[in-house]
Image (cartoon, grey):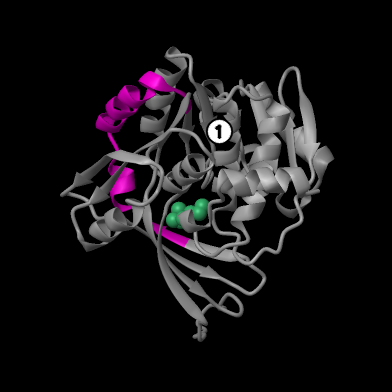
Amino acid sequence: MGVVVLGSINLDLTTYVPRLPAPGETLFGTSFITVPGGKGFNQAVAAGRLGATTRFIGRIGDDGFGKEVQSLIAREPVDVSGIAVDPASSTALAVISVDERAENAIIVISGANMAHDMAEVARCEAALADASVLMLQMESPLTISLAAARVARAKGATVLFDPAPATPLPDEAYQLANLMTPNEIETEILVGFRPANVVEAEQAAVILRQRGLETAVIKLGSQGVYYQSANDEGFVPPFAVNAIDTVAAGDAFNGGVAVALSEKRPLAEAIRWGAAAGALATTKPGASSSMPTRAEMLALLDNGS
Ligand code: RIB
């Protein structure tokens, strides 16, 4: 059973710098890469490379950046026939800096991503005919994502909602999502405090579940991942890797979780798959370019901590 991803696709313009610049400061960078990104497309590449039949639904502009994106994504194991070319919008861009500690700062110009309308929901509905997981994020209009979530739930699919970048959400979002996967910063925006440890992550999960969410998955960065549903709860410690670039690690995490769920694996195993995929994404440069293969993920699961 496959995975459908509805969401953003960006061209990522990524600079590597010794440290992130201060306001008003000019810095020399060390290198620059251009890769396809966007939380939606990164999650689709993660799911595809990790072994799921994956379809991506999104929108780009009819411009030079769009043509560059199209040529770069052709090699990925993702069905991209659900990408519409919108002559009225520009292709989305992300301007990214990554420092020597592997931390990043990202500015997104949303362009065509925020022009999604019910046409994306219709393409999503068609793609869900033979898929069991729908992945959503928040770089495209929430109303359209929620419409797609309603369709997915009606078809019996699992909705994996990544509330990134976060804004406060209506209760319906918690009721439509089967799982949400906020990191610490996103959790703070959703519940009002930033979980600093597992005990606080548990408190945040309880609040999210009181709003109607089935399964809360709180990513604590280098501290690991806490998850809680009605029948299950647990903590997955981080995998030890040599991190060079943390861009899209959260997207890889979601990809791992989605693929495991599409294979009907238990929640605890799905979270471990996500944690392993997320860790591996930090070991390579770029966004979609850093997504691990299934063989790489299984090797880390077998040999990692
Ligand atoms: O999650 C990482 C992604 O955030 C980047 O690929 C960038 O495009 C932004 O959407």
Instruction: Indicate the secondary structure of the residue bearing disc 1.
Output: helix
Residue 71 in view of the camera:
yes
Q: Is residue 119 magenta?
A: yes
Tell me the residue that label 1 is attached to: 258
Judge the density around disc 1: few (<14), some (14-19), many (≥20) Cα neighbours within 10 Å.
many
Which residues lie in the magenta part? Answer: 107-133
Is 286 displayed left or right of 206 in the figure? left
Q: Position of residue 111 (x, y in %)?
A: 30, 52
As drawn, which residue projects farthest toward the left?
A: 87
Q: Position of residue 36 (x, y in %)?
A: 39, 57
As drawn, which residue projects farthest toward the right?
A: 199
The three-letter code of the residue at mark 1 reads: Ala
The residue under the point 75% across, 43% down is 302
Query: Which of these two is toward me, 196 or 229?
Result: 229
Q: Position of residue 18 (x, y in %)?
A: 60, 80
The residue under the point 24% across, 55% down is 90
Q: Is residue 114 magenta?
A: yes
Is 59 displayed left or right of 97 in the figure? left
Res 210 quadrant in image = top right
Q: Position of residue 217 (x, y in %)?
A: 67, 35
The residue under the point 39% across, 26% down is 148
Determine the main secondary structure of the stretch shown in magenta: helix
Query: Which of these two is toward me, 241 or 287?
Result: 241
